Amino acid sequence: MMTDDELITKLEETTKDAPRHQLDTLRAILERNAGVRYLRRHYPTPAAVDAATFRRSVPLSCYDDDYADHILRIADGSDDDRPLLSVDSLVCFFYSSRMSSMKPKLIPYFDSAPSKAISFLAHQGSALSKAIILTHPGFSPCLHSDLVDGIQAPYAAGLVRAICFLESKWEQLCQDLEYGYPSSGISDVAMRDSVTEVLSEPQPELAKRCRSICEEEDWGGILSKLWPNARYIKCVTTGNMEQYYSKIKYYGGELPVLGGDYFASECCVGINLDISQPPELTQFTMLPTAAYFEFLPFDMNKTSARDEETVDHTGVEVGKMYEVVVTTYRGLHRYRLGDIVKVVGFYNSSPQVEFVTRAPKTPSEVLTEGDLMSAIKSFQQVLRNEAMTEVTEFAGFLDLELNPKQLKVFVEVREGSIFLQLEKLNESVLVLRGCCSYLEDGFGAIYKLMRERGEVGPMLLYIVKPGSFDKILQVAIENGAPASQYKPPKIIRNHKIVDLMEDCAVVTVCLDSFDG
């Protein structure tokens, strides 16, 4: 374990000469994996190739087109004496956190010593002790509330989901604490035994304390009341997690919300050196030894970056946006990560970036995550003013099978909304039609241009009942995704998920004209 001073010294060393460390990292990766079949397809002696030749010889790659079949063969045990992706031994597989399709990506985890070392460095840089990992509220955090000095979750969405679950189940939780054993609602035998062991005996005083806190009508600051010695909340709040930041601030009260680092499922990307900043000001310092990074220029007003060439650390420009491309120790080569970042400066010679949005998956996609989030933010404000309604979750789907194409937007609202009251159906439809233009006005320039040309038809807005997006979570878990790592999709790319959402709709409005 490094001391803070040693950690800072290490970071200073690697960022002062980032270009050299990047070339050393690429050389180490190529020397290590010189014999893998994926690299051999493009040239026979990859270990002897410099960075420029590497970029010319190896094409840009993506998961579905270039790795999915390889990884399935490895999972099936079909990898022969000459390894497909990495010479290191396979430890396990894990699923990516994104759920825009029905099944998350399967990521192989190879036993790579350099990769483990940089991951350890990055994790240690943001480590804090005595924190509860709150992805599902239960009995143990309540029993030891005085020992908790921090509240952590991988992603802001998971933390909000856990609090909302507590909000709906706190009475049962208090009853279980009071009786000393779980309710009949917990049917799993192993879980019942575990809960009974944790409780050990009735906890009437604790039940009374929790009940007095949770029965308050205003849940503002609830986390600091339940865990009075907690000093912070820590989770990822950037990107599509930003929508949950205000809710976490509300539930946390005076507790500071600390941001996370930049970790993708495929590799570590950067460290957040000032975790106290709000998501809109969060910057990540790229780690030159974590992977070999390239940057593919990205323009929000273009649908494709196919004609662009990547640049390395030395070629990025402050103020410009790029899609991150990585070559990793664990078998991914010139892999398009799908993240769009904006270069905002440099820490020594290493770029500092802000996360902007997810990249469109195909040139036919005319709406980005960022477009949708920005539009919903304006739409939410209008709904609060016009209908006293709170948006709890949302997603969009562009139906490419229709001619013209059609955008479908699914919005989940909180219980008590006018849109959930059957007797006010006509009134709610009128309100929605009046608000739709605010939603569509927030979409990007490409969508608006295609809408004006008639290439995209009238938008469909669906109000879905509370709990609808939890069904997507259940599908993700059934397909192998860990609940704690789950990120609700903002752009849906699977018709089965769309069908699921449409079945949950209580009100549907078609925006018949571009001006609403």
Image (tube, rainbow, N blue to C red):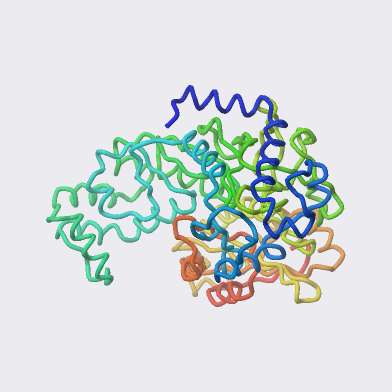
Q: On the picture, is 326 further left or further right than 232?
A: right
Q: On the picture, is 86 further left or further right than 221?
A: right
The x and y percentages for residue 28 are 66, 41
The x and y percentages for residue 110 are 54, 54
Give the total of numbered labels.
Answer: 0
- The one nearer the camera, 339 or 370, is 339
For image coordinates 44% across by 35% down, the residue present is 256
- Whether residue 141 appears in this view of the structure is yes
The x and y percentages for residue 351 are 69, 33
What is the quadrant of residue 398 in the picture?
Answer: bottom right
User: Height in image: 256 above or below 510?
Assistant: above
Specify the quadrant that holds the N terminus: top left
The x and y percentages for residue 329 are 62, 47
What is the quadrant of residue 176 in the picture?
Answer: bottom left
User: Height in image: 308 above or below 8?
Assistant: below
Q: On the picture, is 1 further left or further right than 32?
A: left
- The one nearer the camera, 313 or 229, is 313
For image coordinates 64% across by 51% down, the residue present is 378
Specify the quadrant that holds the C terminus: bottom right
Q: On the picture, is 144 further left or further right than 40?
A: left
- Whether residue 431 appears in this view of the structure is no
Q: Furthest-front residue in view?
A: 81
What is the quadrant of residue 367 in the picture?
Answer: bottom right
For image coordinates 34% across by 60% down, the residue present is 168
